Amino acid sequence: MAIPLKQAAHVGAYIAKQRLTHTQRYPLTLMLEPLYRCNLACAGCGKIQHADEILKAQLTPEQCWAAADECGAPVVAIPGGEPLMHPQIDRIVQGLIARGKFVYLCTNAILLTHKLDIFEPSPYLTFSVHMDGVRQDHDDSVCREGVYDVAVDAIKQAKARGFRVTTNSTFFLGADPGRVRQMFDEMMAIGVDGLMVSPGYAYEKAPDQEHFLQREQTKELFREILQDPPDSWSFNHSTLFLDFLKGEVEYDCTPWGMPCYSVLGWQRPCYLLDEGYTHTFQELMDETQWDNYGPRSGNPKCQQCMVHSGFEASAVIDASSNIGAGLRTLRKALV
Ligand code: SF4
């Protein structure tokens, strides 16, 4: 089980508290985007197509901490853009850890080796390194030769210095299950603590619109990728989310489970769709018509979506609230 026990216990206690107070909707992970700038231009990314003035903007550490305080989620993921390009990323991370947040700093790892000195290893800090495939597949995915080797070297150096590292992989139409499995083997062999996966989502702004997966294609791909997983693989996910990707369990989306805050404000309704922004988290929760989102709503934009940021919260809440689902998770964690 790749999710550290301390984090699992903390999140479990947080969910129990929400249930005791009869809170219907609550966040599990804040997706904090302190900037949209990036040092890559991946074909499947919908974040770097913003106007220049937005790409130049960045959140201050104080804005990041205020968002974390307001939202209250126990986990903070920091995607972007490339967060290591933020000149105060170390202060941002320190302040979040000081608040008891479990921080996942998502990075393409191009700058990671040079930035390791500004961070301290901590059970509250994980570098989540973008890794979409074996060497050629990854370099094709990020549209630049040599990035796989840079990332592998950075992972090894981070691990040697005591940091917690996971990989973070997004798969698109045409992904080869055998080569994905090979990449998982390679990553576990160099010592990553866990693997994270998601099907790619059809960002309207992404340059490549032809390789996003439909729902049935997603299930077929993940059934092949995850068939008879070797003991050496460790996933930084709820096992129920992996079951969901394989089509063995159905969930509706929990878009408020991973709210997104960026230089534009709180993004409505989720990390992927861009239907306006609110100034405060409370406004996001109170004023969003949540019933209009998720596959069961009938919203055509949600019909093919199975992404991590929409559905992992559904799986985690299910495992924590439903004895049968919780036992299934425990049984899978023990075998
Ligand atoms: S189903 Fe996907 S696109 Fe729709 S609200 Fe959920 S995460 Fe967003």
Image: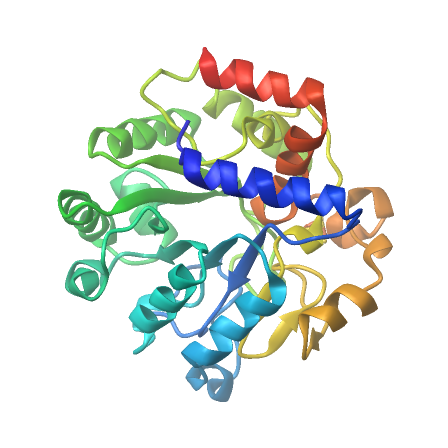
Q: Position of residue 52 (x, y in %)?
A: 47, 86
Q: Nearer the viewer, residue 313 or 271?
A: 313
Apparent side of residue 290 relative to residue 275 in the rendered image (left or right): right
Q: Position of residue 230 (x, y in %)?
A: 36, 16
Against 144, residue 165 (above or below) is above
Q: Nearer the viewer, residue 99 or 276?
A: 99
Apparent side of residue 282 relative to residue 139 in the rendered image (left or right): right
How many numbered marks appear? 0
Q: According to the image, what is the colour scheme of the structure? A: rainbow
Residue at (34%, 66%) from the top-left corner?
A: 94
Q: Pick out the residue farthest to the bottom.
A: 53
- Of the 4 image quadrants, the one containing the C terminus is top left
Q: Is residue 176 visible?
A: yes
Q: Nearer the viewer, residue 91 or 182?
A: 91
Against 55, residue 224 (above or below) is above
Residue at (54%, 47%) from the top-left corner?
A: 200
Q: Position of residue 122 (x, y in %)?
A: 29, 50
Q: Nearer the viewer, residue 71 or 156?
A: 71
Residue at (44%, 74%) from the top-left corner?
A: 35
Apparent side of residue 207 relative to residue 143 in the rendered image (left or right): right
Q: Position of residue 71 (x, y in %)?
A: 62, 64
Residue at (54%, 26%) from the top-left corner?
A: 239
Q: Is residue 248 visible?
A: no
- Of the 4 image quadrants, the one containing the N terminus is top left
